Amino acid sequence: MMEDLQPGQRLARGVSRYLRSLGFAPLEEFVPARGLRVDVMALGPKGELWVIECKSSRADYQSDSKWEGYLEWCDRYFWAVDMDFPAELLPDGTGLIIADPYDAEIIRMAPEDKLAPARRKKLVQKFATDAARRLQTLRDPRLGKDGLLLGGAGEELPEA
């Protein structure tokens, strides 16, 4: 399984493990709005929402032109990189997490910029809905992305 993951996904795995140890519920590859996909969105124990973008190389970071658009969708924004990443490239005013596939650590806490209550409510509802749908899809692999049974209603399907 680990060999199937891309370098950024390996970082996201370590970040997610670390965030769980802090009481957060992380969700990888979350789409807060059309056209945006964050590597990790984490819902904290006090309802805070953090975005963590995982960058596996200088080229990966330099090709990311959307990151500033993520700032309006979280209370805190972090970069997650490995030990070999040139951290001086990362902008001031953002958080820094050093990660590997197994764990992570916050090196620089991101400044807090609280979401408006209406946006927070919308995001938390979408977060919960997406997480529940992913769990149901894992529990019933015969469900398609739209939540409908593959093969149509009433059609006999082989046991999964």
Image (tube, rainbow, N blue to C red):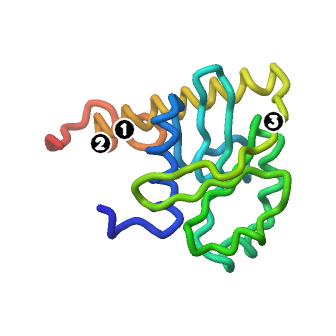
Q: Earlier in the sequence, mark 3 or mark 2?
A: 3
At label 1, the amino acid type is: Thr
- Find residue 83 and report its image quarter: bottom right
At label 3, the amino acid type is: Glu
Farthest residue, direction front? 107
Q: Nearer the viewer, residue 82 or 47?
A: 82
In 3D space, how far apart are the residues under numbered discs 2 and 1 (Cα atoms)? Answer: 5 Å
Farthest residue, direction bottom? 59
Badge 3: few (under 14), some or many (20 or more) residues near its Cα, within 10 Å?
some
In 3D space, how far apart are the residues under numbered discs 3 and 1 (Cα atoms)? Answer: 34 Å
Q: Earlier in the sequence, mark 3 or mark 1?
A: 3
Badge 1: few (under 14), some or many (20 or more) residues near its Cα, within 10 Å?
some
Q: Is residue 71 above or below residue 117?
A: below
Secondary structure found at label 1: helix
At label 2, the amino acid type is: Pro
Residue on which the image places disc 3: 112
Image spot of residue 38 (x, y percent): 65, 51
Residue at the (39%, 34%) spot, across then down: 135
Residue at the (62%, 66%) spot, across then down: 55
Q: Quadrant of the C terminus?
A: top left
Task: State if disc 1 and disc 3 touch (CB < 8 Å).
Answer: no
Image spot of residue 13 (x, y percent): 45, 53
Residue on which the image places disc 1: 137
The tag on residue 141 is 2
Image spot of residue 33 (x, y percent): 73, 42
Task: State if disc 1 and disc 2 touch (CB < 8 Å).
Answer: yes
Q: Which is more foreground, mark 3 or mark 2?
A: 3
Secondary structure found at label 2: loop
The tag on residue 44 is none
Residue at the (75%, 40%) spot, across then down: 76
In the visual, does 124 lie left or right of 103?
A: right
